[in-house]
Amino acid sequence: MHLPDGLLPPSLWIPGWGISGLWLGLNLRQIQHRGDPGRDLPRASLLTAVFFLAGSVQVPVPPASVHLLLNGLLGVLLGPWALPAITVGLLLQAITFGHGGLTSLGVNILIMGIPALLAGWLYRLSRGSWLGAFMAGAVGVGGAVLLFWGTVLLSLGDNPEAERQALLLLVLAHSPLMLIEGGITAGVIGFLRRVKPQLLP
Amino acid sequence: MRPGQFLGLLTLMGVGASLGHWQGIALWLGVSLSLYGRSGLPWTALWLRWRYPLGLLLVLGLLLPFQPGETILWQWGSLRLTGEGVLSLVRVGGRFGGLVTLGGLLLGSQPLGQTLAMLRHWGIPALLLDLLGLAYRYVFVLHVDWQQMQRALWLRGGKLDIPTLIPLLGSLVVRSVERSERVYQGMRLRGYGQPWVGDPQIWQRQDWLWLGGLGGLSVGLGILDSFLG
């Protein structure tokens, strides 16, 4: 779900860098103003590493296998640190195995970051219910799919009606992944509630 | 890598990602590949970077040549291979190839720590760079933990599927958070939070030469591309 280098025209990747850079700057300022940011830094770093690893694991879902995104879970667990964590995770993926890209990094941050923030907000709104956790996982993937294919179609085509239909079809095709990721997010949050509830917001 | 080379390569990447004509993109791709060749980095490392995004490009390779256009090269029923579509594929593929090559050169020429020191010196927020450095360090540590957990699962006769993934992932999150408390104590003991006194490579005259050379090349390619229109 990461756009590679070379696909996007400058009219998309330059504003992508601008918007995500501004958002990230404001986000880091917010973190700095919360007190001792060094206190939360190791936790955010290790959870970033966990999500980076979990995202590279192939989960068998017959007849194929899928890679997890887990941006919804990241949004729930990391709160304001979710955006810097996603930025670092995407940069690491681009650096280590060329998944994503450097010019497309800004757009990829928005594709993964906006749904993650929405997922965290949904979870808190549901007061930590099972349904809220499920929705957080599903919205994380669903939002990323919508933004990813929306950007791809925007960069390639000039037929709005065909683009709208293709987008609808692609989102429907990814709906099983939304259910899987929703279930996994709800499962992991349920596990944490039993084992270490202080980790949850 | 010198700071001037780093900035020059970033400029070349930015200009290359903005080129619109296939001739300009082909020339820029050639420049990128020759710079990579001259760096002495192994070509196998470049292939590893190319391999991952190739899946998406193959999908585009199947779709782009058949996009609507006036120059029909081949037709079978309603399926039309168009000249515009093929050129569009060449443009996307060329830009992808050049950017991945330059990205490999930019990030593969020096250890990550040096790149982070350089970026810190240029004013990139320290919090973000610390997060990147720590996450990079712990990816390898947690990868070993993850492999041990998977091995333990297999030895108990289990296999990785969704029901087993949930407790496995949950355990890894709990372990990581517990480890992070110890990491924080260690960071404080080593003086984290004190003003940073590191001194990355200082900008010298040769950096202006590198930046001028690579920047001039980038500007030249940009001008050539605008004339091709």
Image (cartoon, coloured by chain):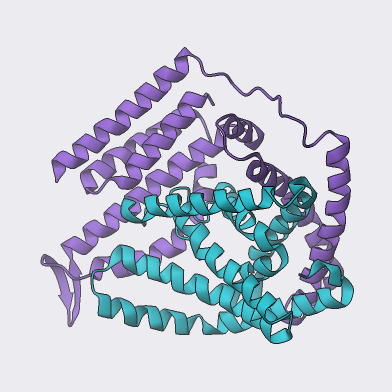
Chain colours: A cyan, B purple
Number of marks in the image?
0
In percent of the image, x 27 and y 43: which residue is there? B26
Left or right of B186 on screen, residue A19 = left
Which residue ends up furthest to the top in the rendered image?
A: B205
Residue A184's image quarter? bottom right
User: Where residue A72 sits: x, y (%)?
Assistant: 63, 71
Q: Is residue B148 above or below residue B185?
A: below
Side (left or right) of A130 relative to A192: left
Q: Is residue B133 visible?
A: yes
Image quadrant where residue A152 sits = bottom left
Which residue is more in the foreground, B176 or B111?
Answer: B176
Residue B172's quadrant in the figure?
Answer: bottom right
| Front one among B223 and A76 | A76
User: Which residue: 42% across, 22% down?
Assistant: B210
**A20 relative position to A195: left or right:** left
Q: Could one spot residue A57 in this view of the protein?
A: no
